[in-house]
Structure formats: C-alpha cells, structure tokens
Amino acid sequence: MRVVIGVTGASGQIYARDLIKKVRLTEGVDAEVIFTDTAKAVYTDETGEELPYPLSDNDSYFNRNASGSNAADVMIIIPCTMGTVGRIANGVTSDLISRIAEVQLKERKKLIICPRETPLSLIHLRNLTTLTEAGALIAPASPSYYNHPQTLADLSEHFTARILDIVGVKQLDSELRWKK
Ligand SMILES: Cc1cc2nc3c(=O)[nH]c(=O)nc-3n(C[C@H](O)[C@H](O)[C@H](O)COP(=O)(O)O)c2cc1C
C-alpha cells in the first residue's frame, strides 16, 4: 500500500510525528512524507524535535504521486491548515501537497484530511463541505476521552490509531475501543 502523509503548518504536530512513526513501522506500507515550509517551523517548535527525514520536496511536482497515472492508495493531511483546506477545495494546486490531494480526489482515491482550527468560520465550513462532497474524509484532530487518557501521548496514540483504522491498517488495541 502506498501512503502519502502531508503535514501543514497547523497546531497539533504531535499527531503528525506519531502517525509518521507508526506508518513507517507498518509492514507492507510504502510511506512518503511531505512538509510545507510553515509545517517545518511549527513541527520543530511544538515537538522540540528534528524533522522526521527523509522528506519529499513540497516545491517540486516531479513526484510519482502527482500524476493520476501513478496515484497513491491513500493520502493523509495531518494536521491540515485552513489555508491548505481552502486551496484544495478551490482547485488551487500551488504546492505538491495540494496537487497530490487534487489527484486523489479526481482519481477517487482515499484522501483523509485532519483539519485543525477553532472556531471555524463560514468559509472554513464551506470549504470542508466541498471537500466532503468531492470524496475526502474529514477527520478532525479531536481525540476521544472515553478511554481515560492520562497524557498527551495517550491522546495522540488513540487518535493516530483511529486514522490508521480509516487508512485500512488496524492499529488500535481492542481495549481502547469503545465497548460497554
Ligand atoms: C504556531 C502556529 C500555529 C498555527 N496553527 C494553525 C492552526 O491550527 N490552523 C490553521 O489553519 N492555521 C494555523 N497557523 C497558520 C498557518 O501556518 C498559515 O495559515 C500558513 O500560511 C499555512 O500554510 P500551509 O497550509 O502551507 O502550511 C499556525 C501558524 C503558526 C505559526
């Protein structure tokens, strides 16, 4: 399975860090990771860590996933800024991340968007609706609390495992799933 992870400059970079780690450790998954310039700054600021190299160049369209003839199986944008949401919803492919997202939508391939902003304006909500109508799956970076998380790592663990569920790679421990 080929997976592209796009990281943009929203808050919540621990989700990107943890998802990238998990995907890279998953057998049978060929992962490519792309950061916007703003994401690079916010990632190092919020995590205090080095960027998770290797990264693909967001300024170059010479990338296999940028063509419908060789589209990825799944793209996840985590966290996704309202700027990137707006660009994709309006067909503005000004960087590799927005171009691959466009390819995923036109080829009817999976596109998972984890938006992060609060509160949401009418423009944000309309753009997110457009993306849903076009076939994207909107999965807000909104972790659950029914599993009684104690740390930030617990929150991220649960949320990123849920995203991998949607990708089609079951990761979440059964004791962390809701059941009564
Ligand atoms: C520390 C920091 C946190 C930010 N958090 C958010 C956020 O949560 N959501 C958002 O939409 N934009 C956020 N922004 C603004 C975006 O980074 C900005 O709109 C940028 O142009 C997005 O570019 P990109 O989509 O190419 O990464 C944040 C910026 C900084 C510096």
Image (tube, rainbow, N blue to C red):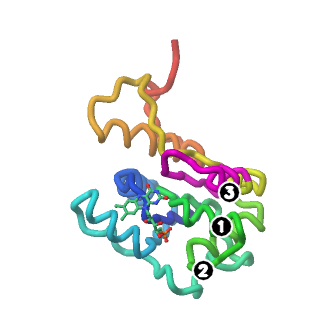
Identify whether 83 is placed above or below 149: below
Q: Earlier in the sequence, mark 3 or mark 2?
A: 2
Ligand 1, what quadrant? bottom left
Query: Where in the figure is residue 15, as x and y percent of width and height?
Result: 40, 51
- Disc 1, ligand 1: is the CB inside 8 Å? no
Residue type at numbered disc 1: Ile
Label 3 element class:
helix
The residue identified by callout 2 is 94
Rendering coords of residue 169 (x, y %): 54, 47
Disc 2 secondary structure class: loop
Left or right of 123 on screen, residue 158: left
Find the distance from the CA under tag 1 to the CA under tag 3.
9 Å
Q: Position of residue 50 (x, y in %)?
A: 25, 68
What segment is highlighted magenta in the picture? Answer: 111-129
Q: What amino acid type is highlighted by mark number 3?
A: Asn
Camera-nearest label, 1 or 3: 3
Q: Residue at x 44, y 71 (%)?
A: 35
Task: State yes or no: residue 124 in magenta.
Answer: yes
Query: 86 or 30: nearer the eye?
Result: 86
Q: Dot 3: within a 10 Å radius of its alpha carbon, few (fewer than 14), some, or many (20 or more) residues? A: some
Which residue, given by chain and number where applicable, does mark 1 sit on? 88
Distance (Cα) linking label 3 and label 2: 17 Å
Distance from disc 1 to disc 2, alpha carbons, whole Å, reads 9 Å
Residue assigned mark 3: 127
